[in-house]
Image (spheres, rainbow, N blue to C red):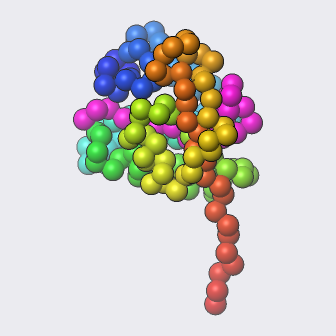
Amino acid sequence: MGNDPDVMRFIGPPSTMAAAEAARGRVDAVLAEHGYCFWAVERKSDGAFIGFCGLQPGYGVLEGQTEIGWRLRRDAWGQGFAREAAQASLGWGWANLAIPAITAITVPANTRSWGLMERLGMTRDHDADFDHPAVPDGSPLRRHLTYRIARPISRPATP
Protein backbone atom coordinates (compact mmCIF):
# COMPACT_ATOMS: atom_id res chain seq x y z
CA MET A 1 0.00 0.00 0.00
CA GLY A 2 2.75 2.45 0.93
CA ASN A 3 4.60 1.48 -2.23
CA ASP A 4 1.72 2.48 -4.52
CA PRO A 5 2.34 5.95 -6.04
CA ASP A 6 -1.42 6.57 -6.31
CA VAL A 7 -1.96 5.80 -2.61
CA MET A 8 1.00 7.98 -1.63
CA ARG A 9 0.23 10.80 -4.07
CA PHE A 10 -0.89 13.24 -1.35
CA ILE A 11 1.25 11.86 1.47
CA GLY A 12 4.79 11.72 0.18
CA PRO A 13 7.13 9.44 -1.71
CA PRO A 14 6.40 5.70 -1.76
CA SER A 15 7.66 3.87 1.32
CA THR A 16 10.47 1.39 1.54
CA MET A 17 10.03 -1.81 3.51
CA ALA A 18 12.27 -0.36 6.24
CA ALA A 19 10.08 2.76 6.45
CA ALA A 20 6.94 0.61 6.62
CA GLU A 21 8.44 -1.47 9.43
CA ALA A 22 9.43 1.71 11.31
CA ALA A 23 5.88 3.06 10.92
CA ARG A 24 4.51 -0.23 12.27
CA GLY A 25 6.82 0.13 15.27
CA ARG A 26 5.51 3.65 15.92
CA VAL A 27 1.89 2.43 15.73
CA ASP A 28 2.68 -0.41 18.14
CA ALA A 29 4.29 2.09 20.55
CA VAL A 30 1.24 4.39 20.40
CA LEU A 31 -1.05 1.44 21.07
CA ALA A 32 1.07 0.27 24.01
CA GLU A 33 1.19 3.75 25.56
CA HIS A 34 -2.34 4.99 24.88
CA GLY A 35 -4.49 1.94 24.18
CA TYR A 36 -5.55 3.08 20.71
CA CYS A 37 -3.92 3.81 17.36
CA PHE A 38 -4.45 3.59 13.61
CA TRP A 39 -5.95 0.10 13.42
CA ALA A 40 -5.75 -2.35 10.51
CA VAL A 41 -8.84 -2.39 8.30
CA GLU A 42 -9.89 -5.75 6.92
CA ARG A 43 -12.58 -6.47 4.37
CA LYS A 44 -15.37 -8.40 6.12
CA SER A 45 -16.08 -10.69 3.17
CA ASP A 46 -12.63 -12.27 3.04
CA GLY A 47 -10.52 -10.81 5.87
CA ALA A 48 -8.10 -9.16 3.44
CA PHE A 49 -6.03 -6.26 4.80
CA ILE A 50 -7.14 -3.16 2.89
CA GLY A 51 -5.56 -0.37 4.90
CA PHE A 52 -5.75 1.39 8.24
CA CYS A 53 -7.97 3.83 10.06
CA GLY A 54 -8.22 5.03 13.60
CA LEU A 55 -7.28 7.60 16.17
CA GLN A 56 -3.98 8.65 17.65
CA PRO A 57 -2.79 11.35 20.00
CA GLY A 58 -1.67 14.29 17.91
CA TYR A 59 2.00 15.20 17.76
CA GLY A 60 3.88 18.14 16.31
CA VAL A 61 1.40 20.74 15.08
CA LEU A 62 -1.45 18.58 16.45
CA GLU A 63 0.03 18.23 19.94
CA GLY A 64 -2.70 18.01 22.56
CA GLN A 65 -5.35 16.97 20.03
CA THR A 66 -6.70 13.61 18.92
CA GLU A 67 -6.23 12.86 15.24
CA ILE A 68 -8.28 10.59 13.01
CA GLY A 69 -6.62 9.21 9.91
CA TRP A 70 -7.06 6.59 7.22
CA ARG A 71 -5.27 5.09 4.24
CA LEU A 72 -6.62 2.34 2.02
CA ARG A 73 -5.24 0.27 -0.83
CA ARG A 74 -6.23 1.65 -4.21
CA ASP A 75 -8.43 -1.37 -5.01
CA ALA A 76 -10.51 -0.57 -1.89
CA TRP A 77 -11.27 3.03 -2.86
CA GLY A 78 -14.81 4.16 -3.61
CA GLN A 79 -16.53 1.27 -1.84
CA GLY A 80 -17.43 2.97 1.45
CA PHE A 81 -14.73 1.23 3.51
CA ALA A 82 -13.02 4.47 4.60
CA ARG A 83 -16.30 6.03 5.70
CA GLU A 84 -17.38 2.91 7.59
CA ALA A 85 -14.02 2.64 9.35
CA ALA A 86 -13.88 6.38 10.13
CA GLN A 87 -17.41 6.37 11.56
CA ALA A 88 -16.50 3.39 13.74
CA SER A 89 -13.31 5.16 14.86
CA LEU A 90 -15.24 8.31 15.77
CA GLY A 91 -17.79 6.25 17.68
CA TRP A 92 -15.02 4.45 19.56
CA GLY A 93 -13.38 7.78 20.39
CA TRP A 94 -16.56 9.32 21.79
CA ALA A 95 -17.26 6.20 23.85
CA ASN A 96 -13.74 5.74 25.22
CA LEU A 97 -11.89 9.05 25.30
CA ALA A 98 -12.68 12.16 27.35
CA ILE A 99 -11.91 14.58 24.52
CA PRO A 100 -13.83 17.58 23.21
CA ALA A 101 -13.05 17.09 19.51
CA ILE A 102 -11.28 14.99 16.91
CA THR A 103 -9.05 16.54 14.22
CA ALA A 104 -8.07 15.45 10.71
CA ILE A 105 -5.60 16.96 8.26
CA THR A 106 -4.92 16.62 4.56
CA VAL A 107 -3.55 18.59 1.63
CA PRO A 108 -5.87 20.79 -0.46
CA ALA A 109 -5.54 18.58 -3.57
CA ASN A 110 -6.75 15.47 -1.72
CA THR A 111 -10.42 16.07 -2.45
CA ARG A 112 -11.38 12.47 -1.60
CA SER A 113 -9.96 12.84 1.90
CA TRP A 114 -11.41 16.23 2.80
CA GLY A 115 -14.65 15.23 1.09
CA LEU A 116 -14.89 12.28 3.48
CA MET A 117 -14.11 14.59 6.38
CA GLU A 118 -17.10 16.71 5.39
CA ARG A 119 -19.36 13.66 4.93
CA LEU A 120 -18.38 12.60 8.46
CA GLY A 121 -19.67 15.94 9.74
CA MET A 122 -16.25 17.51 10.21
CA THR A 123 -15.87 21.22 9.50
CA ARG A 124 -12.87 23.08 8.18
CA ASP A 125 -10.96 25.21 10.67
CA HIS A 126 -9.38 27.71 8.28
CA ASP A 127 -7.50 29.40 11.13
CA ALA A 128 -5.74 26.10 11.92
CA ASP A 129 -4.55 25.35 8.36
CA PHE A 130 -0.76 25.20 8.29
CA ASP A 131 2.40 24.55 6.31
CA HIS A 132 3.67 21.13 7.41
CA PRO A 133 7.14 21.59 8.92
CA ALA A 134 8.35 18.18 7.65
CA VAL A 135 7.56 19.03 4.02
CA PRO A 136 10.02 21.16 2.00
CA ASP A 137 9.14 24.70 0.90
CA GLY A 138 7.66 24.73 -2.59
CA SER A 139 6.20 21.23 -2.33
CA PRO A 140 2.51 20.92 -3.26
CA LEU A 141 2.19 18.75 -0.12
CA ARG A 142 3.37 21.47 2.28
CA ARG A 143 0.01 23.23 2.89
CA HIS A 144 -2.39 21.27 5.09
CA LEU A 145 -6.08 21.79 5.74
CA THR A 146 -7.46 21.16 9.22
CA TYR A 147 -10.90 19.69 9.90
CA ARG A 148 -12.55 19.05 13.25
CA ILE A 149 -15.61 17.44 14.70
CA ALA A 150 -16.84 18.23 18.20
CA ARG A 151 -18.03 15.63 20.67
CA PRO A 152 -21.74 15.03 20.08
CA ILE A 153 -24.03 16.45 22.72
CA SER A 154 -25.54 13.67 24.80
CA ARG A 155 -29.28 13.87 25.10
CA PRO A 156 -31.09 12.21 27.99
CA ALA A 157 -33.18 9.21 27.06
CA THR A 158 -36.88 9.89 26.90
CA PRO A 159 -39.31 7.44 28.47
Residue in the picture at 69% in, 78% down: 156
Which residues lie in the magenta part?
Answer: 57-75
Residue 99 visible to an observer of this rendering: yes
What is the quadrant of residue 55 in the picture? top right
Residue 103 visible to an observer of this rendering: no
Residue in the picture at 37% in, 23% down: 9
Q: Which quadrant would the C terminus be assigned to in this image?
A: bottom right
Query: Residue 14: where, in percent of width, then height?
Result: 38, 15
Would you say residue 113 sits in the magenta stretch? Answer: no
Up the image or down, 42 lies above or below 6; here it is below
Foreground pick, 71 / 141: 141
Query: Residue 78: where, in percent of width, then height?
Result: 28, 45
Query: Residue 72: where, in percent of width, then height?
Result: 37, 35
Residue in the picture at 61% in, 34% down: 129
Instruction: Determine whether, in the image, residue 87 is placed left or right of residue 100.
Output: left
Would you say residue 62 sits in the magenta stretch? Answer: yes
Foreground pick, 157 / 103: 103
Up the image or down, 136 lies above or below 6; here it is above
